[in-house]
């Protein structure tokens, strides 16, 4: 429930744990000061606005909100050479119901290392007389008691116009600290043991006064100290509180307790003090005190349902059982207290300065206009009045108050249950639509895959057919890409290139991926066609001991070209080539006869070149065949 290793005078009082927060908004629901903001997917405490009531700590089922621990600070105080005194809130009797006799928990506190152990009831007796003076000497101004730190914090921060109505009297534990410093030593170190978390920060305001308190431990922290040091009621003997001792001030933790100390009668007919407790009653009484002239009563308020239900008490305690324990405890002690000595002590300290002042810390948030609120409600889909009734799940009683908090930067839309449900439904509909679309896409994909497989099979079959057809050709065929890498080559092309190419083809069928530059010297013909896009047909090139007739043509402009290569030396090609070229000569001669005279010379030149080529091919063929 607490944050450890934080110095008493430093660090935020209440802090939330992001990892534990489940966004139940319970903390928002119980916070009266709008000191909790929902951001980054968890509740965040706003320290300037926090009044330290600790309700968020006790109400969070996830234990995601913690208050600052001062155990380490108190242990360090005890280790010093200074004397250390403990002031016990009378609510301690309601906390340690598991301890048979109050003298046992007094002894247990001493065992922790405290030199002096006192109870606050004497200080309650003292300040009760101060309050009696305010009531008896009424001058037309009604006061609000200041014994409860959250009440003071709330009025200073949220109701600054009521600051002047705060009774100018220190809280009882500060009064008791003044008594102890006066009786024992100015250098005395004082630790307050209480059920109140707000006292941890309130004590700082008195740090430089004669009522300074050096540390505040809740009863939960006190139990931790006992456990840490192995202290139980069985390990100690009886011990009484150190003087001065109080009387009816021991009733302080329960309603009417303060004024019971000085026998102020608050019956329904004659009472002029309105006494109430609990968050709801506290807020309503403040509201009416401010706005209703007919109230005309002083207010004695507990923010909690009495100190016996404070956030520093162990969880699970029953209010009326604790109330009963406190009353029994006071009755038992009253029998043992020396009334004469009590009067002497009261007389000794009656002139002690127990006054205090307050500071206005107006932290009220700006109130947005109705138009601004209506815009937010419209954005949330709550334009209609019937949509603004409010379910309270967000932590705010109405949708309009939620919209106001949103404009004040305290909430986000996702905090609204109905908004989130509508958004979720919209999301679900979109998901369903997406799923339907995905289902159709899947079906289409299955069909596409089936079609692709069919097309792949057809393509493979076509490729195999093409390869088979290419391999049937007596001419060499090669297809290359823009980098002159072989895409496809038939077996005849491989055989024409010789043994090296055959070895490569055994590893890489069809020479796929091989560089044409490394295979043939006439690769430039392919480069020319790739760059120009113009086919090159029937070009004769020397290759080793052969003459190749090369034709290169575009398949895909500037990207893919194909080549047909014929070895003019082989008998079958030579015979075909002789016939073809002879036919070409006859055709050209016939055309030449029909041309004008000046073309005769050019035709004769071509004829001579063609015949020479035929003769040369014939000679090479004869050498190759051994004829």
Image (spheres, helix red, strand yellow):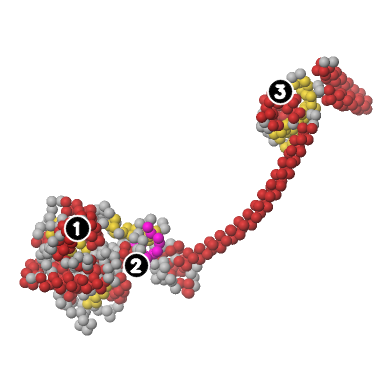
Query: Which disc is residue 30 wearing?
Result: 2
**Is residue 159 visible to the viewer in this orientation of the structure?**
yes
Q: Is residue 159 left or right of residue 206?
A: right
Q: Nearer the viewer, residue 413 or 188?
A: 188
Instruction: Say which residue label 3 marks.
Output: 499
**The magenta stretch spans which residues?**
20-36
Q: Nearer the viewer, residue 111 or 377?
A: 111
Query: Which disc is residue 231 wearing?
Result: 1
- Going from N to C along the chain, the mark reached first, 2 or 3, is 2
Q: Is residue 562 left or right of residue 250?
A: right
Relative vertical location of residue 533 with respect to residue 234 in this rendering, above or below: above
- Which residue occupies 66% across, 52% down? 446
The mark lying in front, picked from 1 and 3, is 1
| Secondary structure mostly taken by the magenta-highlighted segment of the chain | loop
Residue at the bottom extreme?
269
State the separation of the CA atoms marked 2 and 1. 36 Å
Q: Quadrant of residue 265?
A: bottom left
State the separation of the CA atoms marked 2 and 3. 93 Å
Q: Name the quadrant of the N terminus.
A: bottom left
Label tally: 3
Other residues around mark 2 within 10 Å, as few (<14) / some (14–19) / many (≥20): some
Please provide percent x and percent y for residue 69. Answer: 26, 57
The mark lying in front, picked from 2 and 1, is 1
Please provide percent x and percent y for residue 141. Answer: 21, 75
Q: Nearer the viewer, residue 580 or 514?
A: 514
In the image, residue 26 lies in the stretch drawn in magenta: yes
- Which residue occupies 90% across, 22% down? 600
């Amino acid at each position: 429930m607490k944050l450890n290793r934080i110095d008493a005078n430093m660090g935020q009082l209440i802090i939330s744990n992001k990892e534990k927060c489940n966004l139940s908004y319970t903390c928002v629901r119980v916070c009266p000061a709008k000191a909790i903001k929902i951001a980054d997917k968890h509740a965040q405490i706003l320290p300037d606005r926090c009044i330290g009531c600790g309700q968020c700590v006790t109400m969070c089922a996830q234990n995601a909100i913690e208050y600052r621990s001062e155990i380490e600070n108190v242990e360090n105080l005890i280790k010093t050479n200074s004397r250390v005194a403990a002031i016990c809130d009378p609510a301690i009797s309601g906390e340690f119901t598991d301890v048979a006799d109050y003298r046992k928990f007094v002894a247990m506190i001493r065992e922790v290392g405290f030199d002096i152990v006192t109870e606050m009831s004497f200080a309650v007796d003292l300040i009760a007389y101060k309050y009696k003076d305010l009531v008896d000497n009424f001058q037309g101004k009604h006061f609000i008691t200041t014994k409860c730190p959250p009440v003071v914090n709330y009025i200073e921060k949220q109701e600054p116009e009521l600051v002047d109505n705060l009774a100018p009297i220190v809280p009882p534990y500060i009064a008791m600290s003044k008594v102890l410093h006066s009786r024992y030593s100015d250098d005395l170190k004082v630790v307050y043991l209480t059920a109140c978390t707000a006292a941890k920060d309130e004590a700082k305001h008195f740090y430089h006064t004669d009522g300074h308190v050096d540390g505040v431990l809740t009863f939960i922290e006190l139990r931790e100290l006992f456990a840490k040091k192995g202290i139980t009621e069985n390990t100690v003997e009886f011990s009484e509180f150190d003087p001065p001792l109080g009387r009816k001030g021991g009733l302080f933790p329960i309603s009417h307790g303060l004024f019971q100390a000085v026998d102020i009668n608050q019956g329904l007919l004659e009472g002029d003090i309105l006494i109430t407790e609990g968050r709801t009653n506290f807020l309503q009484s403040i509201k009416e005190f401010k706005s209703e002239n007919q109230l005309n009563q002083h207010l004695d308020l507990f923010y909690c349902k009495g100190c016996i239900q404070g956030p520093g008490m162990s969880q699970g305690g029953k209010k009326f059982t604790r109330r009963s324990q406190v009353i029994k405890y006071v009755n038992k002690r009253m029998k043992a207290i020396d009334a004469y000595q009590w009067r002497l002590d009261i007389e000794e300290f009656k002139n002690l300065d127990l006054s205090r002042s307050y500071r206005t810390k107006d932290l009220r948030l700006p109130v947005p206009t109705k138009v601004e609120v209506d815009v937010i409600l419209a954005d949330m889909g709550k334009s209609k009045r019937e949509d603004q009734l409010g379910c309270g799940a967000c932590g705010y009683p109405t949708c309009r108050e939620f919209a106001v908090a949103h404009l004040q930067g305290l909430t986000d839309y996702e905090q609204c249950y109905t908004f989130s449900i509508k958004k979720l439904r919209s999301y679900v509909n979109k998901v369903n639509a997406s799923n339907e679309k995905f289902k159709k896409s899947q079906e289409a994909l299955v069909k596409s895959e089936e079609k692709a497989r069919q097309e792949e099979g057809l393509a493979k079959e076509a490729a195999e057919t093409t390869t088979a057809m290419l391999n049937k050709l007596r001419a060499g065929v090669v297809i290359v890409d823009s980098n002159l890498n072989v895409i496809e080559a038939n077996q005849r092309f491989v055989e024409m290139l010789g043994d090296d190419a055959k070895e490569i083809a055994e590893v890489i069928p069809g020479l796929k991926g091989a560089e044409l530059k490394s295979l043939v010297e006439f690769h430039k013909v392919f480069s020319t066609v790739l760059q120009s896009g113009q086919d090159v047909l029937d070009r004769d090139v020397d290759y080793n001991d052969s003459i190749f007739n090369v034709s290169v043509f575009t398949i895909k402009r500037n990207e893919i070209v194909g080549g047909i290569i014929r070895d003019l030396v082989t008998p079958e090609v030579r015979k075909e080539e002789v016939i073809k070229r002879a036919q070409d000569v006859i055709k050209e001669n016939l055309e030449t006869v029909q041309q004008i005279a000046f073309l005769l010379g050019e035709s004769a030149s071509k004829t001579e070149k063609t015949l020479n080529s035929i003769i040369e091919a014939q000679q090479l063929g004869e050498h190759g065949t051994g004829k």
